[in-house]
């Protein structure tokens, strides 16, 4: 049985349905993530799990126990759920140690001190318990908030955009640290974020949300290489759609060559198969296009974004379409230069053509360097 289970939940504010028939399950000790743009309903789902919102439909079970239905909502304080908020919500008048101990009221003083010391050591703040929140950096405050949430040994830990107030470098480092801490305590957790890098760093499973629904609940690998629909393909990673034509059920021809698919191609939602010559949009990621000086196939450099170890090139093909290629940065080519490329596609991802020409699937267009 799943440790956390949401079955077809709806939630509405007035006449506006913000969560629609959403289902997910999470095993004990796993870290899940709700990932999506602002306004997609991910924080609302977290509030439903915590018991702050009443469902309009469906049910939520925690460790097998029914905690939410439209008719009944178990109060938040009875759910054994820990929460880490975006703004940390530390008590400024309490020391770090007293903040961590806040949820341990009623526990024997010796056991309480032992638990606080244990958690401060776990989050890398041993001997810092005497300090106050204003004396700590943002990253340290976030660790204190995590320690406080873990102190009562919650059945489930909820993290609502926990890194959004931190700078990019600290956010990335702390993401990995938080994952290690949660795993060390074998705590089941749900993270909410709009940042896919955070989601990939922390979560075992990720649900991509759009307009109150989960579009795909899967591993980070599958979300990137096997997106279930165009929204997921567009939201996760970078890439472009190239127009292709069906050769047979397992092959599609694009300008760069013929791609072999391990699964049958799908040309429309309600048809039995693909007819030879049918158009398809083919997703190509930057790692699908390999820079190769020896290749006779050439493309023109039209944009480049330096990323330290790599350069993300935007390349124009002979037919005018553009593709992306991630290349080691010692291959530093000038704008306008024609470079050799070849295909190295392990996962062929195609979608039925939607009206008009194929559009870029990138949500942050590389800029000229």
Image: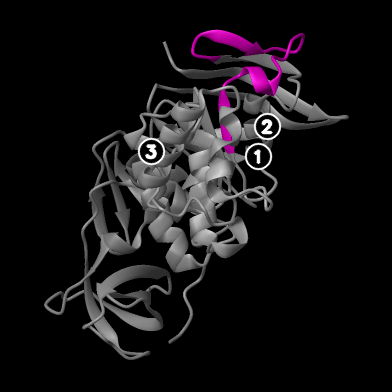
Q: Secondary structure at mark 2?
A: helix
Write the residue at 47% across / 32% down: 189
Q: Is residue 44 visible?
A: yes
Verify CB contact (< 8 Å) between mark 1 and mark 3: no
Earlier-in-chain disc, 2 versus 3: 2
Crowding near pointer 3: few (<14 within 10 Å), some, many (20+)?
some
Residue 361 visible in the shown view: no
What is the image's colouring? one colour
Q: Nearer the viewer, mark 1 or mark 3?
A: 3
- 133 to 347, vertically: above or below: below
Q: Which residue is mark 3?
A: 118
Q: Nearer the viewer, residue 346 or 322?
A: 346
Residue 149 location in percent, x, y?
54, 36
Q: CA distance from mark 2 to mark 1?
A: 6 Å
Q: Which residues are magenta?
A: 62-83
Spatial CA span between label 1 and label 3: 30 Å
Question: Which sits in the foreground, 222 or 301?
Answer: 222
Alpha carbons under labels 2 and 3: distance apart: 29 Å
Which residue is label 1 attached to?
43
* Residue bearing the label numbered 2: 47
| x, y percent for residue 251 | 26, 44
């Amino acid at each position: 049985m799943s440790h956390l289970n949401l079955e077809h939940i709806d939630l509405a504010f007035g006449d506006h349905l913000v969560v629609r028939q959403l289902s997910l399950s999470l095993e004990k000790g796993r870290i899940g993530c709700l990932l999506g743009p602002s306004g997609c309903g991910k924080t609302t789902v977290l509030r439903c799990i915590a018991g702050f919102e009443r469902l309009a439909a469906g049910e939520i079970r925690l460790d097998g126990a029914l905690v939410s239905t439209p008719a009944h909502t178990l109060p938040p304080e009875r759910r054994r759920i820990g929460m880490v908020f975006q703004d940390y919500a530390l008590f400024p008048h309490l020391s770090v140690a007293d903040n961590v101990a806040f949820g341990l009221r009623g526990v024997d003083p010796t056991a309480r001190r032992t638990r606080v010391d244990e958690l401060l050591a776990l989050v890398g703040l041993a001997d810092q318990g005497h300090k106050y929140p204003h004396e700590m950096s943002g990253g340290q405050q976030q660790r204190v908030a995590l320690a406080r949430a873990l102190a009562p040994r919650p059945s489930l830990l909820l993290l609502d955009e926990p890194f959004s107030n931190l700078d990019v470098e600290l956010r990335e480092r702390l993401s990995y640290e938080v994952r290690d801490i949660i795993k060390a305590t074998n705590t089941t957790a749900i993270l909410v974020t709009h940042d896919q890098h955070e989601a990939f760093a922390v979560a075992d499973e990720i649900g991509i949300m759009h307009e109150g629904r989960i579009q795909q609940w899967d591993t980070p690998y599958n979300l990137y290489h096997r997106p279930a629909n165009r929204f997921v393909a567009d939201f996760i990673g970078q890439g472009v759609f190239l127009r292709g034509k069906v050769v047979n059920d397992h092959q599609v021809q694009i300008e760069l060559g013929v791609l072999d698919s391990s699964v049958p191609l799908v040309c429309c939602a309600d048809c039995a198969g693909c007819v030879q010559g049918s158009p398809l949009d083919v997703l190509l990621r930057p790692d699908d296009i390999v820079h190769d000086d020896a290749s006779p196939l050439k493309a023109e450099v039209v944009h480049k974004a330096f990323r330290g170890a790599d350069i993300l090139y935007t390349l124009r093909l002979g037919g005018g379409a553009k593709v992306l290629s991630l290349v080691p940065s010692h291959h530093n080519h000038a704008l306008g230069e024609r470079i050799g490329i070849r295909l190295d596609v392990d996962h062929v991802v195609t979608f039925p053509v939607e009206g008009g020409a194929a559009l870029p699937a990138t949500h942050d267009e590389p800029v000229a360097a």
